[in-house]
Image (cartoon, rainbow, N blue to C red):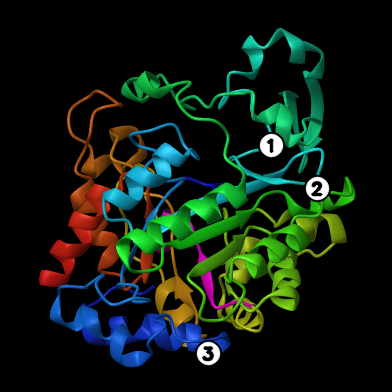
Amino acid sequence: MEREQGGQGGERRPGRRALLGAAALGAGAAALAAHGPAAAEAPRTGAPSADAPGRLPVPTVIGHRGASGYRPEHTLGSYQLALDMGADVIEQDLVPTKDGHLVCRHENDITGTTDVSAHPEFADRKTAKTVDGAQLTGWFTEDFTLAELRTLRAKERIPAVRQENTLYDGRWAVPSFEEVLRWAEEQGRRRGRPVWLHVETKHPTYFRKLGLGLEEPLAKLLRKYGRHRADSPVFLQSFEPGSIERLGRLVGSRRVVLLSAPASRPYDFTDSGDRRTYGDLMKPEGLRWIARFAQGIGPSLTSVIPTGADGKLGEPTALVSDAHAAGLILHPYTVRNENQFLPTDFRRGTDPNAYGDSFGYFRALLKTGIDGIFSDNPDTARLARDDFLKG
């Protein structure tokens, strides 16, 4: 994630929403909680417990690229901190290496998230490419073997915004997805409950044309680590519906179609000549189509509650109620604490990098009835969720 920075509002009904996460997933696969509806009803009390194995609180807190508000994204350090801060699910974005391994990077262009430019032995790998119609110049994972990538170190993607995170530049390597699966297994044993993952296939059409399809190696790893079933603690996600359809033929894991700006199109639609836009997929007919092969959607925040020309928060759309009517859950993306990422009426002061009133923004979003939310700041999201459930 993500392509875009970002339901009918109304009275909050925790009991219905607690069940909805399980019921909606059940429409396409299995209950959200591994122990069935009784476990899924836990949030009725306003105190979702993580004590029962397999239980996933609703609304669900998803650590966006780990705890990327505090550590360089997609590192084991970021994932660990997100888990320690109370995230219910940890997100990974997957891209392939030259030799077909899956690694965790937000993009295949690793210029801004690793120290590759400081490695003279890789100077000749810098190149220009067109990825999903965008022209890019830099270094790309598909031009490196896994062994070569292991010689690089991760660094903060937006150092001008998150200067404190640069303290950790060079501390962690680029993790392979298999390393993350092993980490999740180890943490699950220590904690006595599964560690949930939210796994995205990045640019799947682009990579398939290079002979580096993502879905088959991903499915192989999911089967190897027992995360291929409908009740496994994993969500699979993509901005390309075709990737989700393909994954659905390979594994039973829960699947989420990510939705970008309404006027834009999924790249696999662009490639195949399908004229539908993301906006079309957000209409009731489009949502019913998605529900044929997925259990949820991941819209941008502004598709749930748009902002006006002045940048202030507007009124909720019908997306939440329409998606729920189609039997789909919603995991919108992404809340960040810094002013520049918040609607203008939730900003505090004039420093774009200072924290604003993200608690207020979380509250407005959770009131719409969403089933989970991505955040760079999982500790803030966890507190906001807990406050919301207390009423």
**Quarter of the image holding residue 51?**
bottom left
Identity of the residue furthest to the top in this view: 120
Q: Residue at x 57, y 53 (%)?
A: 261
Residue named by callout 2: 207
Does residue 105 belong to the magenta stretch?
no
Give the x, y percent position of residue 99. Answer: 82, 41
Q: Earlier in the sequence, mark 1 or mark 2?
A: 1
- Magenta-colored span: 294-305
> Mark 1 near mark 2, Cβ–Cβ under 8 Å?
yes
Give the x, y percent position of residue 165. Answer: 36, 25
* Mark carried by residue 27: 3
Give the x, y percent position of residue 42. Answer: 23, 82
Residue named by callout 1: 108
Q: Is residue 305 visible?
A: no
Marks 1 and 2, how far apart in space?
10 Å
49 and 237: which is toward the camera: 49
Query: What quarter of the picture does the C terminus occupy?
Result: bottom left
Q: Amino acid at mark 3?
A: Ala
Q: Earlier in the sequence, mark 1 or mark 3?
A: 3
